[in-house]
Image: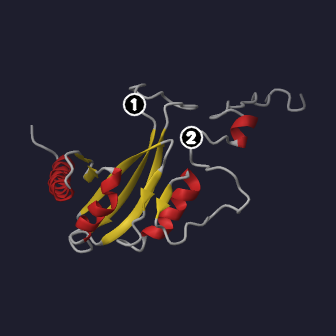
């Protein structure tokens, strides 16, 4: 059976992503990487976060974004985690790329829930400042050395971090997520005034 064009293109993207991930992992001293769906991802230790970015910056100078994920075991909606023994943590990721060949990598690190502190990337990538402010405001992750870690979206009097899974959402207290579907009976066509 012959491989379709789309399957061949996807396989080629994954092959390129794997080559990028392996090369960047060697550059930053990591032995953990993945290459799925054409995306290279390299895991680095939190203590090596800034140095890893410094090393990669020479090859991939464009800072695309920084984001965080709350990997909590307590799931209010959806499926519970596959491995209930997996430690709760925050994952912080940044995407770095070049601007000529389209090569890119996501660097990822984990932070414990009880001490979500990470060194700032603002000295390596100036564009990281805004993204770190967002992660600090929404997840409560502190970025040591950040020059201006103030809120972006929420009023100064707002308490809490709304993207943490433990943050109570008022709408869920009023009507549980995902909410039941309220379906009314269709109007009768026999007697429209009934």
Residue shown at the point (23%, 45%) measured from the top left: 32
The tag on residue 153 is none
- Residue at numbered disc 2: 165
Task: Where is residue 33? Give x, y as percent.
Answer: 23, 47
Q: Residues within 10 Å of mark 2 (few under 14, many from 20)?
A: some
Q: Are marks 1 and 2 in contact (CB under 8 Å)?
A: no
Q: Is residue 24 left or right of residue 116?
A: left
* Pick the front one: 130 or 105: 130
Q: Earlier in the sequence, mark 1 or mark 2?
A: 1
Whether 134 is drawn above or below 14: the answer is below
Task: Where is residue 12? Give x, y as percent.
Answer: 15, 53
Label 1 SS: loop
The tag on residue 86 is 1
Between circles 1 and 2, the one closer to the viewer is 1
Label 2 SS: loop
Quarter of the image where one finds residue 181: top right
Which quadrant of the rendered structure holds the C terminus?
A: top right
Quarter of the image where one finds residue 63: bottom left
Which quadrant of the rendered structure holds the N terminus?
A: top left
Q: Is residue 168 left or right of residue 163?
A: right
Q: Residues within 10 Å of mark 1 (few under 14, many from 20)?
A: few
Residue shown at the point (54%, 71%) measured from the top left: 148
Residue shown at the point (39%, 66%) measured from the top left: 121
Residue shown at the point (54%, 31%) measured from the top left: 75
Task: Where is residue 127? Give x, y as percent.
Answer: 42, 72
Q: Is residue 42 left or right of residue 79?
A: left
Q: CA distance from mark 1 to mark 2?
A: 16 Å
Q: Residue furthest right?
A: 193
Q: Is residue 10 left or right of residue 122?
A: left
């Amino acid at each position: 059976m012959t491989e379709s064009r789309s399957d061949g293109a996807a396989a080629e993207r994954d092959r390129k992503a794997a080559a990028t991930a392996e090369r960047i992992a060697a550059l930053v001293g990591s032995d953990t990487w993945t290459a799925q769906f054409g995306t290279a991802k390299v895991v680095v230790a939190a203590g090596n976060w800034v140095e890893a970015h410094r090393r990669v910056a020479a090859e991939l100078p464009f800072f695309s974004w920084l984001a965080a994920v709350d990997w909590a075991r307590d799931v209010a909606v959806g499926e519970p985690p596959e491995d209930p023994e997996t430690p709760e943590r925050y994952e912080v990721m940044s995407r770095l790329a070049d601007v000529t060949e389209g090569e890119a990598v996501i660097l990822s690190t984990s932070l414990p829930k009880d001490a979500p502190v990470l060194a700032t990337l603002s000295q390596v990538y100036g564009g990281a400042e805004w993204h770190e402010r967002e992660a600090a405001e929404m997840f409560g992750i502190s970025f040591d050395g950040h020059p201006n870690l103030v809120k972006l979206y929420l009023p100064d009097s707002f308490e809490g971090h709304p993207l943490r899974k433990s943050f109570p959402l008022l709408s869920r207290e009023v009507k549980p997520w995902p909410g039941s579907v309220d379906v009314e009976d269709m109007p009768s066509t026999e007697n429209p005034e009934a």
